[in-house]
Amino acid sequence: MIDVHVLGSGGALPQAGHTPATYWIVVDGEPLLVDPGPGALVRLAAAGLIPAGTDSIGTVLLSHLHPDHSLDLVALLFAAHSPLPVRTDPLRVWGPPGLLDLLDRFRSIYGSWLEPRSRRLEAGELQPGQALDVPGGGRCEAFAVDHPQDRLSGVCLGFRFLDADGRCAVYSGDTGPCGNLVEAARGADLLVVECSTPDELATPGHMAVSQVAELCRNSRPALTVLTHQYPPAAALDLASLIGASYDGRVVQAVDGDVFTLPHGTGDSS
């Protein structure tokens, strides 16, 4: 089983119902915090997903290192420095090449304030094609996407999450159109994909409406969930716009939506 909690369905410009990236993805009972953007911990707590605070968080995945996808990593590490958490197994943080440099830069500013008190921090960099085993029989596979950066890392990632029964949920991260995303999403049970702008505001390294529609036609996921919406996109009926040229199932996410595989068990749509 895979549960995808969309707690941040917007981009870098926060708006009601569409705050910056935060995803809580549970694979066969094992929770993964994916792309903790600004306010991620507050939203997780408000949703009742971390009843034990930072002790509820075992693994963090970063698709890329832009602040709207990674800023609450600082808040998480600072919270874990408190004397109150008691969890003793490692806090695992995985991201693209450049993550270790980012953590070193954080330490140069905050020093020991970012050292978890009761547990060890284990950080690692994922290369495209690398996979992580998820306790319980699941798996997370990283693939490269097209979202150029000029700081810290030249590699941005998307993720394929697979449960023990082979169900597949794909998260695009931030990306423009690219063949790797088409292949990763082909036949997926769930595709969570950025739809940042309407076509007239299309931006390199991001997906506009017609580009998402083309992706869906080529990959045919069972369910497509649109996220990372900037205000001009969030104001539109994106599902209808994509539905004009694609006959599959599409949902425009808002903060708090939950999608479950197999479909129909707690699926908010």
Image: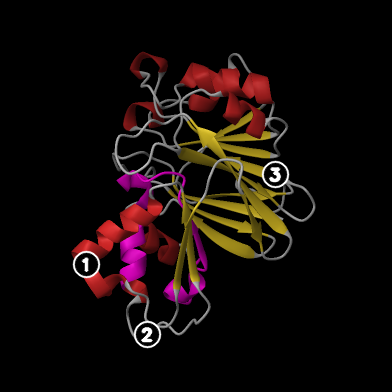
In the image, taking residue 248 as reference, residue 109 lies left or right, namely left
Closer to the camera in the image, 157 or 8: 157
Of all residues, the one furthest to the right in this rendering is 165
Q: Which residue is under mark 2?
A: 84
Amino acid tagged 1: Tyr
Q: What's the amino acid at mark 3?
A: Cys
Residue stretch in magenta: 49-78
At mark 1, the secondary structure is: helix
Q: What label sits on residue 168 in the rendered view?
A: 3
| Mark sitting earlier along the chain (2/3) | 2
Could you tell whether 136 is left or right of 69 in the image?
right
Give how far across and how far down residue 145 sits, in percent. Answer: 50, 32
The residue singled out by tag 1 in the image is 110
Q: In the picture, which quadrant includes the N terminus?
A: bottom right
Give the residue drawn at x 39%, y 52%: 99
**In the rendered structure, are the residues bearing label 3 and label 1 in contact, judged by CB atoms less than 8 Å apart?**
no
